[in-house]
Amino acid sequence: MKNKRISRIGLYFMLPYLILVLIALSFIIFMIMFHPRDSALVGIYLIILAFPWTLPSTGLFEFINRAVGINATLGILLLLILLNAAILYFIGLIIDRMGILKWIAKWVKNHSVLGDDERLR
């Protein structure tokens, strides 16, 4: 079997995005529970977090919201957000597997403006 390990750089790419999603969801729940009159546009944060997929299909979300309801719309948004998180993880995985960060660190070390004595201080 191959060595299957979780990409640390992929997690570094994905976790801040998922933390933003949790903050947006907790804000939505807070606004709906404690300020229901002001919660009309509170879902815009999820639309922004699922941005590349929601731009061309805003009319589709309005149709789904009218036909099925808000629960289906939020479910689709969360699936698109998970798709974004998976894409971010795989970008980090590719960077990790190709050794791009090691190459950048080596290039910076070789092209440093400071001399060896000044770099050690």
Image (tube, helix red, strand yellow):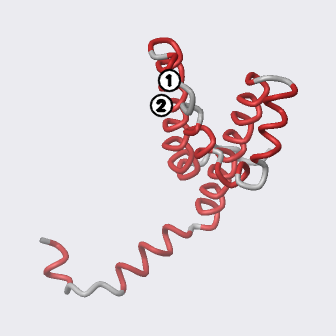
Residue 17 percent coordinates (x, y): 53, 43
Q: Where residue 23 is drawn, which disc sits there?
A: 2
Residue at the extreme right: 67
Asked if disc 2 and disc 1 are in contact, CB closer than 8 Å, the reply is yes
**Front residue of this view, candidates 48 and 41:** 41
Q: Picture quarter containing residue 6? A: top right
**Front residue of this view, candidates 12 and 53:** 53
Residue 120 percent coordinates (x, y): 17, 73
**Front residue of this view, candidates 17 and 9:** 17
Q: Picture quarter containing residue 95? A: bottom right
- In the figure, is residue 33 to the left or right of 120? right
Q: Mark 1 points at which residue?
A: 26
Q: Whole-Å distance between the Cαs marked 2 and 1?
A: 5 Å
Q: Picture quarter containing residue 5? A: top right
- In the figure, is residue 104 to the left or right of 55? left
Residue 74 percent coordinates (x, y): 71, 29
Q: Quadrant of the C terminus?
A: bottom left
The residue at 55%/37% (across/down) is 18
Q: In which quarter of the image is the N terminus?
A: top right
Image vertical order of residue 22 relative to residue 58, above or below = above
The residue at 74%/24% (across/down) is 70
- How packed mark 2 is, by other alpha carbons closer than 10 Å (few <14, some 14-19, many 20 or more), is few
